[in-house]
Image (tube, rainbow, N blue to C red):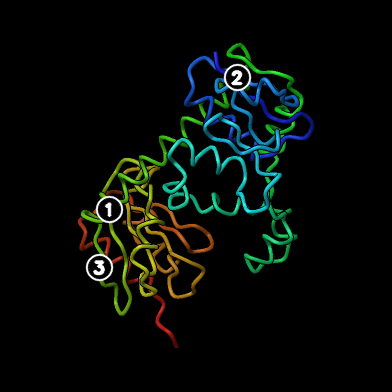
Amino acid sequence: MYRIVTHPGSAHKDDFLSACVLLATLDHAEVFRREPTAADLNDPNTYVVDVGFEYAPERHNFDHHHDRTLPCAFHLVMQHLGHHAAAMLMFDWYPHMSMMDVRGPYRTAEHLGVDSSVLFVTSSPIDGYILSTFAEAKSLSIRDPLFSLMTALGKNLIVLIDRKMKRLERLKTEARVIPVKHLKAVISDIKKSPKLAMELYLRLLDDDRIVMSITPSNRGEGWELLRLGDNTIVDFRAIAENPEIRFVHGSGFLAKTQVLLPEHEVVRLARLAIIEPE
């Protein structure tokens, strides 16, 4: 039986997500929210996370508070599990989570070039509820519903990294960049989770002239045409009355066709949504 020990009191994403990925990785583990003992720190079957003032991965101790050069505990755990480098590439939130934990919201906001209030108003009540529930627990075992949720979340994170990496490689060979008037669109006909890793592929392409993506819809049988970025060049309201169109969002950033039209037909619709400059 493995034990995961993290600090009592307020819970944060750092200790919570660390426990999640460890639960997903270790067989027969329990979580304890208390101060670690010397025996805990010396027992390799006890994973001490975000507490203990010691970073010793060989003994499974993952704290960062004693050393300002270390990233958050979640990053230390992910490094130990071999997922850190891939997570840095796969998830936009991943590097900034460590900055929030280590340097705080004001320095993070400064780094991102936004007002700190943006970070607070975008906080989620879902996060708040789950973290407060975790904070109230003294221990968690397989009998606890939160234990099951945490294990599933940890497994999902690890699996998603692998899925996104594989999808990115598939997009490199199967997706196409096509001209749309004087601009470009990226089109992919992968039907299962059609937008998975698309943001990574677009980042790899690094082409400002790509203004929309065209993928199978994940709701319905047709194509989804999606405007990329907050531009005014693409407005799908221009094709809202076309009989091939099933849905157009009121702000014009998204359109869906009735069926999976031949590629040349959906590209024709995409051209009609390009608003020529006056």
Q: Quadrant of residue 150?
A: top right
Regarding mark 3 in the picture, which secondary structure is present there? strand
| Side (left or right) of 66 relative to 93 | right
Q: Of residues 238 and 80, which is closer to you in this image?
A: 80
Q: According to the image, label 1 marks what residue?
A: 171
Regarding mark 2 in the picture, which secondary structure is present there? strand
The quarter in which the N terminus is drawn is top right
Q: Badge 1 local density, few (<14 within 10 Å), some, or many (20+)?
A: many
The quarter in which the C terminus is drawn is bottom left
Q: Is residue 41 above or below residue 174?
A: above
| Side (left or right) of 25 relative to 69 | left
Q: Quadrant of residue 12?
A: top right
Q: Which residue is found at the position 69% from the left and 18% from the top?
A: 139
Q: Which residue is found at the position 70% from the left and 33% from the top?
A: 52
x and y percentages locating residue 21 in the rendered image:
52, 31
x and y percentages locating residue 178 in the rendered image:
25, 68
Between disc 2 and disc 3, the foreground one is 2
Q: Report the amino acid beneath label 3.
A: Ile
Q: Which mark is residue 3?
A: 2
Q: Badge 2 local density, few (<14 within 10 Å), some, or many (20+)?
A: many
- Any part of residue 126 in sight: no
Query: How far apart, in angstroms, are the residues tagged by discs 2 and 3?
Result: 53 Å
x and y percentages locating residue 97 in the rendered image:
61, 49
Q: According to the image, label 3 marks what residue?
A: 178
Q: Is residue 106 above or below residue 55?
A: below
Q: Report the amino acid beneath label 2.
A: Arg
